[in-house]
Image: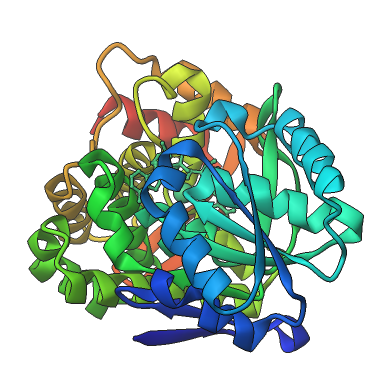
Amino acid sequence: MTEVAVRLGERSYKVYVAAGEVERLGVTARRHLTGNRILVITNPTVRALYGGTVQKSLAAAGFVVCEIEIPDGEEFKTLDTVKELYGKALDIGLERGDAVVALGGGVVGDTAGFFAATYKRGVALVQVPTTLLAQVDSSVGGKVGVNHPRGKNLIGAFHQPRFVVADVTTLNTLPVREIRAGLAEIIKYGIIRDVRFFEWLENRLQNLLNLEQTALEHAVSLSCRIKADVVSADEREEGIRAILNYGHTVAHALEAVGCYHHFVHGEAVGVGMVAAARLAVRLGMLSVPEAERIAALVARAGLPVEIPAGMDAEEIISAMFHDKKVVENRLTFVLPEAIGRVRIAHGVPVESINAVLTGAS
Ligand SMILES: NC(=O)c1ccc[n+]([C@@H]2O[C@H](COP(=O)([O-])OP(=O)(O)OC[C@H]3O[C@@H](n4cnc5c(N)ncnc54)[C@H](O)[C@@H]3O)[C@@H](O)[C@H]2O)c1
Ligand SMILES: [Zn+2]
């Protein structure tokens, strides 16, 4: 087992990465929680697969366990769902000293996390992520929240979990498309912080796609360590935490112009990371071979590297402007200077972005 420490003063916590860790959840919870009652929030898909194991493990450790399901899907990451949770939690008499376990992917983690941040001014939260994306990204760092009809993640809070359990065996049941989507964020960590990890990924990509446990454990724990370091340095994204958005300026724009049906998030991040690397080349910050290495690894992970045919670069760019603070037709981008090192570049001219998106040389 690997333990990753997220250092945030009195809000510090551990991420436990290991195979079979869900079965030991009750024992771990005993070490970290003072209350005696736990509300498990999950969805029908994940409940059918892991709900029983979680319930059994918590009960064996002496907890009184309640369970509430939320519907499966990004479209249910809303205040309406949270409102339902408030009602059901009040019905069962959930108290401030009780705890919430979020069991599922990022949608469950973000929604249950926002519920835990706000119910009776905040109850203890435990994240048990069951998708690769949630294990390497959404369960660590304390951002919780829901979507608003006008945009994603517009309503939210910072609410750090008491601990996180990332059990890589849960990934065995995950559709391959979701594995590839999680790989996008893993590749991101290599590019922003750690060239040796990037090289390791180049060598071990197939082991990860084959869901080999030791490879997964290494990739998940290193990803969590990189995210933990960045979050420890800047919990509320006042500076350095923004580097975690590498590839996401273009990704969010792609998602906004209706690519939600076309792409899952990690696929949009694949396109976005390659676009940002090409932009860095264009601005004289990155060498062509390094940009090509980035594109090659993203492609080998089975992720798209180009914007889909028929999508309009102008429309994508205007979505970017809509999303971000714009100063005189210029945007802020996270750009690589080398694999393993990125810089927050302010004032990137729109013409350069346009040239990259339209493939002009
Ligand atoms: N809070 C953050 O810092 C942060 C960071 C990144 C992403 N997010 C959010 O995360 C969400 C995306 O999360 P996601 O990619 O995990 O999607 P998701 O939660 O929708 O999960 C994807 C699908 O996999 C299913 N599933 C989950 N675990 C499974 C398992 N072990 N086996 C089989 N099926 C399983 C789910 O039921 C769902 O249908 C988005 O809402 C995004 O905004 C948040
Ligand atoms: Zn992302």
**Residue at 65% from the left image edge and 72% from the top image edge:** 63
**Residue at 32% from the left image edge and 38% from the top image edge:** 267
Q: Quadrant of residue 166?
A: bottom left
**Residue at 37% from the left image edge and 41% from the top image edge:** 272
**Residue at 51% from the left image edge and 35% from the top image edge:** 252
The image shows residue 47 at horizontal and vertical percentages of 46, 46
Q: Quadrant of the N terminus?
A: bottom left
- Along the line of sight, the residue nearer the viewer: 127 or 231: 127
* Horizontal side, residue 273 vs residue 94: left or right: left
The answer to whether any part of residue 193 appears in the image is: no
The image shows residue 48 at horizontal and vertical percentages of 40, 44
Q: Quadrant of the C terminus?
A: top left
- Along the line of sight, the residue nearer the viewer: 312 or 285: 312
Q: Residue furthest top?
A: 310
Give the colour scheme of this rendering.
Answer: rainbow
Residue 218 versus residue 206 in the image, above or below: below
The mark total stands at 0
The image shows residue 121 at horizontal and vertical percentages of 91, 59
The image shows residue 161 at horizontal and vertical percentages of 65, 69
Residue 175 versus residue 245 in the image, above or below: above
Q: Quadrant of residue 85?
A: top right
The answer to whether any part of residue 124 appears in the image is: yes
Residue 182 versus residue 148 in the image, above or below: below
* Horizontal side, residue 284 vs residue 238: left or right: left
